[in-house]
Amino acid sequence: MLALRADLLDFTAAPTWGHARSEAVRWRPDHWLLVGDDGRIAGVQPPSWQPGPGHAVRDERGRLLMPGFIDTHVHSPQLDVIGSYGSQLLDWLESYTFPAEVAHADPEVAAAGAERFADALLAHGTTTAVAFPTVHKVSAESLFAAAERRGMAIVTGKVLMDRHAPDGLRDDVTRAERDCVDLIARWHGRGRSRYAVTVRFAPTSTPEQLAMAGALVRADPSLYVQTHVAENRDEVRWVAELFPEARSYLDVYSRAGLLHRRSVYAHGIWLDDGDRARMAEAGAQVAHSPSSNLFLGSGLFDWRQALHAGVPVTLASDVGGGTSLSMLRTMADAYKVQAIAGQRLTAWCALHAATRGAAQALELDAEIGTLEPGRQADLCLWDWHRGIVDERRLAVASDLHERVFAWLTLADDRHLAAAFVAGREAYTRRSNER
Ligand code: GUN
Ligand code: ZN
């Protein structure tokens, strides 16, 4: 049994919007977290507790221990295009992203990319991701395998795209269906892997392909769905031209049977009231991707409006549209996007969305998202500060919210000391001095 001593932070409920004081926050400074040999959290003990001879002791006093972050929308092959200069979504896809993704037809490129991506997630404090690989079956296969080798929970699936994409990046309905059926049979529910029916976005799938995707989900609603919706105004206009019969962009997916409790819709900036009501009714979530939305000039997502409509909102890096895999950077960007709308995103709402909130929205809360006994010990050990500025800022913070908010605003992957996956240390920072 592992006994880890640190400042423990997690949530027992959803924090109320705008409340810096929250009953939902479970703050246990300088406590012991016990992890069983089965990789699950066994319990928590106060500082006065003494470890016994059967305990492997890790005294990390003065560090913060939280559940690993959950990134609900990220593209594994796009580490190669992160930080690409000067364009909005449709041009960015054509100029940078599609050309980079073509290379993943090669099994060696796909495998090396998946390994690098899984390591990079862990090095940023993300222990679970809902991820897009490429259209190539081997890229999905590689990503499942890379996650499994590290013991990580992953939600992914081969990208479906059979039109409006260059040669080497299109499938067809028959082959795509065959590949999906095979991947689902081999990976969905194997260990910590789950399959997501992955429609890139409506413009790159024919109505026949959308119908095929919908049929897969109808046949097995335990499958996830991931796609993009209403990200960019030119994209929204294009979808209206391609699908004149649909009431809205979201309605294209809804009609195809791609809107259910396990559906993850990235962006959703340009949804209307009807769309939000439909998403709430279906229990589908918006994966809010503020870094990407700013970088690609897509727009400002109204979190509060989604919340009012009853739509679950989770947080996502959307790398490579987003410019960092760090969920802390993502939260800091989310704060700024809400600030422009005159809203205040508390540290609690942000951290909850990237842990317990995402776990609930994905129906994975029995497995991840909190420090509750029985959950998998997917944990991150963070330094509160790494430099002169953050050290000083935290020293003068007068209450817990001020301290945690300043931390998440100033911290990034350099603050991550170690990441544990199912109780096993899967990432250790190279220079580990405090
Ligand atoms: N819409 C369709 N494909 C993509 C993608 O790769 N990234 C983003 N941000 N939006 C998309
Ligand atoms: Zn995306």
Image: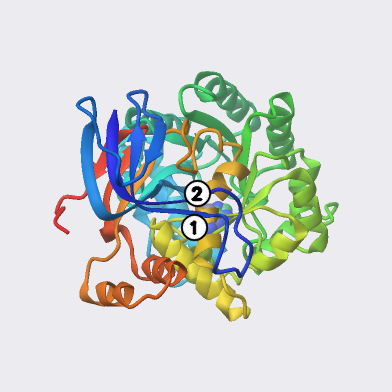
Within 10 Å of the Cα at label 2, are there few (<14), some (14-19), or many (20+) other Cα atoms? Answer: many
Q: In this view, does 198 lie to the left or right of 53?
A: right
Give the alpha-carbon distance from disc 1 to disc 2, as whole Å: 6 Å
Specify whether 325 is left or right of 368. left
Three-letter code for the amino acid on which mark 2 is drawn: Thr
x, y (%) of residue 48? 29, 44
Q: Which residue is drawn at 74% across and 55% down?
A: 310
Crowd rating for badge 1 (residues with CA inside 10 Å; few <14, some 14–19, many 20+): many
Q: Where is residue 103 in the image (x, y as percent from the top left)?
A: 38, 43
Q: Measured from the top left, where is residue 59 in percent x and y?
A: 21, 45
Looking at the image, can residue 248 be seen?
Answer: no
Q: x%, y% of residue 229?
A: 66, 55
Q: Quadrant of residue 410?
A: bottom left
Look at label 1 and name its amino acid: Leu
Q: In this view, does 37 lie above or below 396?
A: above
* Res 354 visible: yes
Q: Is residue 223 above or below residue 206?
A: above
| Residue at image mark 1 | 351
Q: Residue furthest front?
A: 48
**Residue 181 lies in what quarter of the image?**
top right
Q: Residue at x 37, y 65 (%)?
A: 83
Which is more toward the observer, 106 or 350? 350
Give the colouring mode of the picture.
rainbow
| Image quadrant where one finds the C terminus | bottom left
| Disc number placed over residue 355 in the picture, else none | 2
Q: In this view, does 302 lie to the left or right of 90?
A: right
Numbered tag placed on residue 303 in the rendering: none
